[in-house]
Image (cartoon, rainbow, N blue to C red):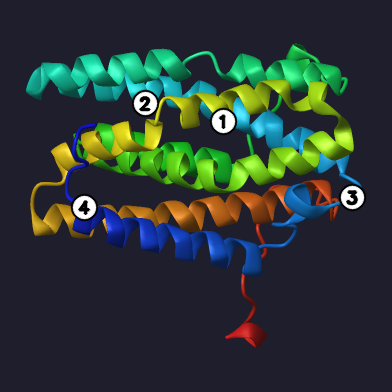
Amino acid sequence: MATKPRPELRERIDALLDSFIKDFYQTVPYAQHQRDAAEINLDYYKRHNIETILRLRRKRTIDALAIKYFTKVDPVQAKAWAHYTDDEMLHDRLFAADLAKAGVTKEEIYSTEPLLATKLLTGYLQYGMEFEDSPLALITSVYFVEYTTTRTQPEWLDNLEKVLGPDEVKGARAHVNTDLDDDHDDFVWRVLTSLATTEEDERAVERHLHHIFWLWKLYFVELHQRTVLGAKDEQIPLPTAADA
């Protein structure tokens, strides 16, 4: 087994991500719903999966920009990221298959306007490629997702399977199993450390992680507002003068 690069840095980053997971469950409304609820809010469940699909579709474009970057500076990484992207490229179909069993058509999925938080998250990653000419934000985000997915989603899917049935989460289960079976977090970490070679780079990784976590929290807050609280628009409540 190959030695995992930069073990001290990885230990620090993983500890930060563990703290994010703890904070997520403690502070975000409905954060524990899919993991623990005996009765699933189907509007919440369906919209979350729709947003997952829309996010994956937009990430394909950003991955292509990362491959283009690597072709100019590191063709070995270009090949590796192209292979990883190939693994993930059509995973939106897995979630669409689950949604079909819940009565959501492809037409409904792909005609849905993404939540504002989804646009902000994917826009943040594209900004890094377009204006910073670096895939560091993207690769950091992918590590964030690979790490937190493999440490949270198996529990979510166990509960969803118990409540909704195994057939209804077959696609999501296949997605997570690919991440686990192929050690995607280890692969992404190797790519990340090939980019983060200085202390300044390491600080940038941590800064991106904090930004990305904030955007993910924003997404789940907006998801809760739209589907559980019945908000009629896409605005996130802002502090008032009384809150200052």
Disc 2 marks which amino acid?
Ile
Instruction: Report if the CB atoms under discs 4 and 2 are less than 8 Å apart.
Output: no
Residue identified by numbered label 3: 38
Of callouts 4 and 1, the N-terminal one = 4
Give the CA distance from mark 1 to mark 3: 22 Å
Please tell me whether mark 3 or mark 2 is closer to you in this view: 3
Local packing at callout 3 (Cα closer than 10 Å; few below 14, some 14-19, many 20+) is few
Of callouts 4 and 2, the N-terminal one = 4
Q: Which mark is residue 7?
A: 4
Please tell me whether mark 4 or mark 3 is closer to you in this view: 4
Q: Nearer the viewer, residue 180 or 48?
A: 180
Instruction: Report if the CB atoms under discs 1 and 3 are less than 8 Å apart.
Output: no
Disc 1 marks which amino acid?
Val
Give the CA distance from mark 4 to mark 2: 28 Å
Please tell me whether mark 4 or mark 1 is closer to you in this view: 4
Q: Which mark is residue 237?
A: none
Q: Position of residue 217 (x, y in %)?
A: 57, 56
Residue identified by numbered label 1: 176
Please tell me whether mark 4 or mark 2 is closer to you in this view: 4
Q: SS for tag 2?
A: helix
Residue 104 is left or right of residue 139, and the answer is right
Of callouts 1 and 3, the N-terminal one = 3
Q: SS for tag 1?
A: helix
Q: Nearer the viewer, residue 113 or 68?
A: 68
Give the CA distance from mark 4 to mark 1: 24 Å
Of callouts 3 and 2, the N-terminal one = 3
Residue 225 is left or right of residue 52, and the answer is right
